[in-house]
Amino acid sequence: MNGAIVSRFEANQERQKQRLAGSAGVSVTYYNGSTSRTIIAVPAPREYAVDSGDGLVTMYQSDDWLVDVADVTQPKRADTIKRTYCGVETTWSVTSVPGRPVAEPSGPSRWRIHTKRTEVDR
Protein backbone atom coordinates (compact mmCIF):
# COMPACT_ATOMS: atom_id res chain seq x y z
CA MET A 1 0.00 0.00 0.00
CA ASN A 2 1.18 3.48 -0.81
CA GLY A 3 2.76 5.31 2.16
CA ALA A 4 0.77 8.49 1.50
CA ILE A 5 -2.49 6.53 1.55
CA VAL A 6 -1.53 4.83 4.81
CA SER A 7 -0.64 8.20 6.38
CA ARG A 8 -3.96 9.71 5.32
CA PHE A 9 -5.78 6.63 6.60
CA GLU A 10 -4.01 6.84 9.97
CA ALA A 11 -4.66 10.59 10.19
CA ASN A 12 -8.34 10.04 9.43
CA GLN A 13 -8.49 7.25 12.01
CA GLU A 14 -6.98 9.58 14.63
CA ARG A 15 -9.49 12.33 13.78
CA GLN A 16 -12.36 9.84 14.12
CA LYS A 17 -11.01 8.68 17.49
CA GLN A 18 -10.77 12.27 18.74
CA ARG A 19 -14.27 13.03 17.47
CA LEU A 20 -15.67 9.96 19.26
CA ALA A 21 -13.88 10.83 22.50
CA GLY A 22 -15.08 14.42 22.25
CA SER A 23 -18.69 13.49 21.64
CA ALA A 24 -19.08 10.29 23.66
CA GLY A 25 -16.15 10.32 26.08
CA VAL A 26 -16.64 10.98 29.77
CA SER A 27 -14.19 11.82 32.53
CA VAL A 28 -13.52 8.83 34.81
CA THR A 29 -10.90 7.89 37.36
CA TYR A 30 -9.04 4.66 36.64
CA TYR A 31 -7.62 2.89 39.70
CA ASN A 32 -4.80 0.38 39.35
CA GLY A 33 -3.70 -0.81 42.78
CA SER A 34 -2.67 2.24 44.79
CA THR A 35 -2.39 4.54 41.77
CA SER A 36 -5.13 6.43 39.99
CA ARG A 37 -5.48 8.81 37.10
CA THR A 38 -8.29 10.78 35.51
CA ILE A 39 -8.84 9.84 31.87
CA ILE A 40 -11.43 10.18 29.13
CA ALA A 41 -13.24 6.90 28.46
CA VAL A 42 -16.11 5.99 26.17
CA PRO A 43 -18.85 3.83 27.72
CA ALA A 44 -19.52 0.96 25.32
CA PRO A 45 -21.87 -1.61 26.91
CA ARG A 46 -21.99 -4.85 24.98
CA GLU A 47 -23.74 -8.18 25.12
CA TYR A 48 -21.66 -11.32 24.49
CA ALA A 49 -22.89 -14.78 23.54
CA VAL A 50 -20.98 -17.30 25.67
CA ASP A 51 -21.09 -20.94 24.55
CA SER A 52 -20.84 -23.34 27.49
CA GLY A 53 -19.58 -26.13 25.23
CA ASP A 54 -22.68 -28.30 25.58
CA GLY A 55 -24.76 -26.37 23.07
CA LEU A 56 -26.16 -23.91 25.60
CA VAL A 57 -25.48 -20.24 24.79
CA THR A 58 -25.74 -17.70 27.59
CA MET A 59 -25.94 -13.97 26.96
CA TYR A 60 -23.52 -11.98 29.13
CA GLN A 61 -23.87 -8.20 29.58
CA SER A 62 -20.63 -6.29 30.08
CA ASP A 63 -20.30 -2.58 30.81
CA ASP A 64 -17.30 -2.12 28.51
CA TRP A 65 -15.20 1.03 28.36
CA LEU A 66 -13.01 2.18 25.45
CA VAL A 67 -9.78 3.81 26.64
CA ASP A 68 -6.55 4.88 24.98
CA VAL A 69 -3.61 2.52 25.42
CA ALA A 70 -1.54 5.56 26.42
CA ASP A 71 -3.87 6.13 29.40
CA VAL A 72 -4.09 2.53 30.62
CA THR A 73 -1.14 0.37 29.61
CA GLN A 74 -2.27 -3.04 30.92
CA PRO A 75 -5.75 -3.40 32.41
CA LYS A 76 -6.10 -6.19 34.94
CA ARG A 77 -8.73 -7.83 37.09
CA ALA A 78 -9.57 -5.84 40.24
CA ASP A 79 -8.73 -2.48 38.64
CA THR A 80 -11.68 -0.11 39.03
CA ILE A 81 -13.26 2.73 37.12
CA LYS A 82 -15.18 5.43 38.98
CA ARG A 83 -17.40 8.11 37.51
CA THR A 84 -19.27 10.86 39.30
CA TYR A 85 -22.34 12.17 37.51
CA CYS A 86 -24.84 14.57 39.10
CA GLY A 87 -23.26 13.96 42.50
CA VAL A 88 -23.59 10.16 42.29
CA GLU A 89 -20.39 8.10 42.20
CA THR A 90 -20.58 4.78 40.37
CA THR A 91 -17.86 2.11 40.49
CA TRP A 92 -17.14 -0.57 37.92
CA SER A 93 -14.73 -3.46 38.55
CA VAL A 94 -12.58 -4.77 35.72
CA THR A 95 -13.49 -8.40 35.10
CA SER A 96 -13.39 -10.85 32.24
CA VAL A 97 -16.23 -12.01 30.05
CA PRO A 98 -16.23 -15.84 30.18
CA GLY A 99 -13.72 -17.11 27.64
CA ARG A 100 -12.16 -13.67 27.07
CA PRO A 101 -9.41 -11.61 28.72
CA VAL A 102 -10.26 -8.58 30.88
CA ALA A 103 -9.39 -6.24 28.00
CA GLU A 104 -9.10 -6.62 24.26
CA PRO A 105 -7.62 -4.36 21.59
CA SER A 106 -10.17 -2.11 19.94
CA GLY A 107 -8.21 -0.73 17.04
CA PRO A 108 -4.51 0.09 17.07
CA SER A 109 -4.51 2.42 20.09
CA ARG A 110 -7.47 1.50 22.29
CA TRP A 111 -8.51 -1.06 24.83
CA ARG A 112 -12.03 -2.41 25.23
CA ILE A 113 -12.06 -3.05 28.98
CA HIS A 114 -14.74 -5.40 30.31
CA THR A 115 -16.34 -4.33 33.61
CA LYS A 116 -19.30 -4.91 35.88
CA ARG A 117 -20.96 -2.14 37.87
CA THR A 118 -20.31 -2.95 41.50
CA GLU A 119 -21.27 0.09 43.56
CA VAL A 120 -23.38 3.23 43.45
CA ASP A 121 -22.88 5.88 46.15
CA ARG A 122 -25.82 8.26 46.43
Image (spheres, rainbow, N blue to C red):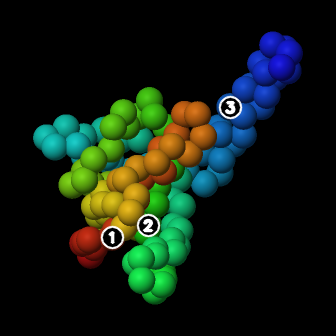
In the rendered image, is residue 9 in sight? yes
Q: Which mark is residue 95?
A: none
- Asked whether 77 or 82 is in front, the reply is 77
Q: Earlier in the sequence, mark 3 or mark 2?
A: 3
Under circle 3, the secondary element is helix
Under circle 2, the secondary element is loop
Name the residue beneath numbered marker 2.
63
The reply to whether callout 2 and callout 1 are in contact (CB within 8 Å) is yes
6 relative position to 56: left or right: right
51 relative position to 87: left or right: right
| Quadrant for the C terminus in the image | bottom left
Image vertical order of residue 93 relative to residue 10, above or below: below
**Distance between the Cα atoms at labels 2 and 1?**
7 Å
Q: Quadrant of residue 108?
A: top right
The reply to whether callout 3 and callout 1 are in contact (CB within 8 Å) is no
The residue at the point 45 percent across, 34 percent down is: 69
**Distance between the Cα atoms at labels 3 and 2?**
24 Å
Q: Earlier in the sequence, mark 2 or mark 1?
A: 2
Mark 1 nearby-residue class (10 Å; few <14, some 14–19, many ≥20): some
**Distance between the Cα atoms at labels 3 and 1?**
30 Å
Image vertical order of residue 42 relative to residue 54, above or below: above
| Quadrant for the N terminus in the image | top right
Name the residue beneath numbered marker 3.
14
Disc 3 marks a residue whose amino acid type is Glu
Disc 1 marks a residue whose amino acid type is Arg
Q: Which mark is residue 117?
A: 1
